[in-house]
Image: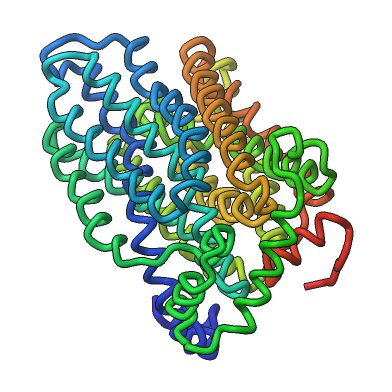
Amino acid sequence: MVQVVNKIYGDEKIQEDSKHWSQYLAVISATIVSIAAGVSIAWPSPSVPRLLDGELQYPVSREEGSYIAIISALGNMAASPISAYLVDIIGRKRTITLISLPQILSYILIYLSSYSIALLYTARFLGGLGEGATFTVMAMYIGEISEPKIRGTLGSYISLTLRVGMLLINVLGSYFTIETTALICLILPATFLMSFIFMPETPYYLLMKNNRSAAEKSLQFLRQRKNVEQELESLQNDVDRQLSESGTFMDLWRIPSNRKACIIVIGLRTFQQFSGISAFTLYTQKLFKEAVDTISPSLSANIFSLIQLILTFFSSILVDITGRKPLLIFSCVSCFFVLTIEAVYFILRDFTSIEVSSLWWLPLGGMILYIIVFSIGLGSIVNLMIGELFNQSVKAKAMCLVNIYFAIAMSVTTKFFQFMTDLNGLSVPILVFGGSCGLGALFCYYIVPETKGRTLEEIQQLLKGKNEREN
């Protein structure tokens, strides 16, 4: 593994990144809450089948199971305006610290949920609060503490740690009860609180609050050098210029550069979610149970999550080498072909007399290939670019609206998958998801800009039609 990474990354790059250890440390510490958010997102995969099989003291219907799966989206939407408000009032660091509170309460209520399904609904809503705050604030924090040359790698850690959480809950949920799994997961927010308290606030936020001395100390820690005056002055100019622009919700659409950023980000979120990833994640075990009977659903789900994690890791390495746009286009095109082939298989199996039993391996093999190509681009780069594209004056408001849209899109695709699968089987939703990936490739090619190696201010100038240098 080390030799492969060295070959892709390059020895000079590894040595250079070793100088950035403080930025990596801050990001790794912060993204422990992303691991917990990943646990919340994928919790229904191993848990809903157990609920339907009667693990708790009360019966749970399929309809109740579907609402347990998606109710976290309500918490997600509720957290977005709250965290967007707090992030400019108390800061990025303190807002991220608060994320651990609903996560802790969520695990406690899941542990107690055998007494009432209402506790389970409440726990899932609280877990959604943690998800929403994570998606609203984390990309902002990472984007503001990272140097341009490693911002792509560090920004990809949001998706990477989400995959860690998804794998963790699928493994734990396969071998432990719901209550025991919840107690184990309490370790995550506890570890986060003990480590993140020592991490710095972002220099951008401190400059926004006219606290130049604290911004200098933050930058000195993050860059691991005492002389940061030149970069500090550049950041001060960038913050002053961006804050001089109007920052209302209407300005997200009224100002052309903000409007362009909104279109890009909403488009990326749309094609990411309508690739089917949230539905496949929430219903992984159900999906594999219906698709293939040669491997246990829990093992299939664990394979699914492990491959996501490994490929997201390699994507985090590649993103600052190849750029964002090529990986996005490759991911969309590949997902289109894989899902289309999968849909054709299920159409032949479920609606024709054509014998496809010899292709029993195709559903599992296709889903593994799908998650490989999804993770390389759509799975990791979308979260990264959301933190790069918005002006400081509107960033918090933009992240709020984008995350609310994300929660809605995730709920729609998940419910669509569940409804269409119950009605017609797997072929229709997978065919729709495949078609969406084809449109996503065109969108990325014609609309999405390349942001590799650019400072946040250079990206703003790019959106304004200036400084269009090639990478």
Name the one closer to the observer, 279 or 206.
206
Name the one closer to the observer, 12 or 303.
12
- Is 90 positioned to the left or the right of 285 in the image? right
Quadrant of the rendered image containing residue 67:
top left
Residue 267 image position (x, y, % from top left): 71, 39
Residue at the location (22% across, 14% down)? 117
Quadrant of the rendered image containing residue 151:
bottom right
Name the one closer to the observer, 104 or 182.
104
Residue at the location (50% across, 57% down)? 141
Residue at the location (14% across, 18% down)? 56
Q: Quadrant of the C terminus?
A: bottom right
Residue 236 image position (x, y, % from top left): 65, 69
How many labels sit on residues? 0
Q: 9 above or below 97?
A: below
Question: Is residue 422 at all visible to an observer of this figure?
Answer: yes
Q: 164 above or below 62?
A: below
Residue at the location (59% across, 17% down)? 352
Identify the colour scheme used.
Answer: rainbow
Question: Is residue 349 at all visible to an observer of this figure?
Answer: no
Q: Quadrant of the N terminus?
A: bottom left
The outermost residue toward the right is 465
